[in-house]
Amino acid sequence: MLPQLAVSAKILCLLMVVICGAVPSMVRSVRLYSQCSHLYVNVFPNGTVMARSGGNDQPNLTISTRGFSLELLIHSPIQDMYLCFNRSKLVGRRLTRFQAERQPNCLFKEEFVNGYNRYHLMKNEDRYIGFNRRGLQLRRGKSRLPERVHKCLDFMKVARGDDFNLDRHNNMLAGDLPKWRPQRRLRPPPQNSIKPPCHGVRHHHGRYQRRKNCDGT
C-alpha cells in the first residue's frame, strides 16, 4: 500500500509542475540580422526597436521558449526589456518573465522560409517583425505588404563569436558554392583499340617489310 501511495504522490507532483508551467525552457543568446537593412536589431533605453546597429557594438538578444510550447519570448538583457507589439509597432517593455508570458502581444512564433527566420505573433499570424532598408519598422501586416517587401521580414540568427560571412551566406543560398564531386573512374580502353606492336615481318625472300598503318605509314 505504501509503495503505491509514494508513486501516486510523485505523479501528482509532476502534474502540478506541468500545470503551473514550471517547465525548464530553452534559452539561446543570438543577434538578429535584418535581411533588408543589413544590420542587427537593437533595443534602445526608451523602448524603441530598430535594425540600425553594427555587429561589434550590438549586445545579444535572448530567445527563449515558454515551457514545451512553441511560443517564444524575445528579451534584451542589456535594457532588461521584452519585445512586444502595441497597437502600432514593436516596442521594448520592462516586464518580468512571469508578466511577459501572460501578455499575448509578447509571445511570438518562429518560421523558417528560404533559409531565414521569421517571427510573428502567436495570436495574429499576419503581424510580423520586420524592418525596411533604413532599419525602421514595417507597420503593416504581411497581407498588406507587396511581395517584393516580404524579404524585409527575414532574419538570420547569429551567435556571438560565430565566423559569420555575409557573402558566403548569400552564395550558399544561391547555390554558388563549389560542391564536392566524386572522381570519375578511368575505364580501360576497349580491346579493339589496342594496336599491335610494329615489328618487321619476314617474308619468304628474306627481307623485312614494315606493316601498314604503323607510325602513320
Image: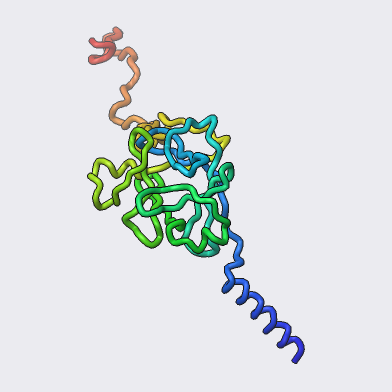
Furthest-front residue in this view = 46
Percent position of residue 22, x then y: 61, 67
Q: Is residue 140 left or right of residue 104?
A: left
Q: In which image quadrant can residue 36 be found?
A: top left
Q: How many marks?
A: 0
Up-down: is 181 above or below 66?
A: above
Query: Who's the residue at 75% across and 92% down the image?
Result: 1
Colour treatment of the image: rainbow
Q: Is residue 198 left or right of residue 110?
A: left
Percent position of residue 111, x then y: 39, 53
Q: Nearer the viewer, residue 75 or 113?
A: 75
Quarter that holds the C terminus: top left
Furthest-bottom residue in this view = 1
Q: In which image quadrant can residue 52 be found?
A: top left
Q: Is residue 177 left or right of residue 83?
A: left
Query: Who's the residue at 23% across and 15% down the image?
Result: 213
Percent position of residue 20, x then y: 59, 71
Can residue 183 be seen?
no
Q: Nearer the viewer, residue 163 or 190?
A: 163
Can residue 3 be seen?
yes
Percent position of residue 105, x then y: 43, 58
Q: Is residue 124 left or right of residue 64?
A: left
Up-down: is 2 above or below 22?
A: below
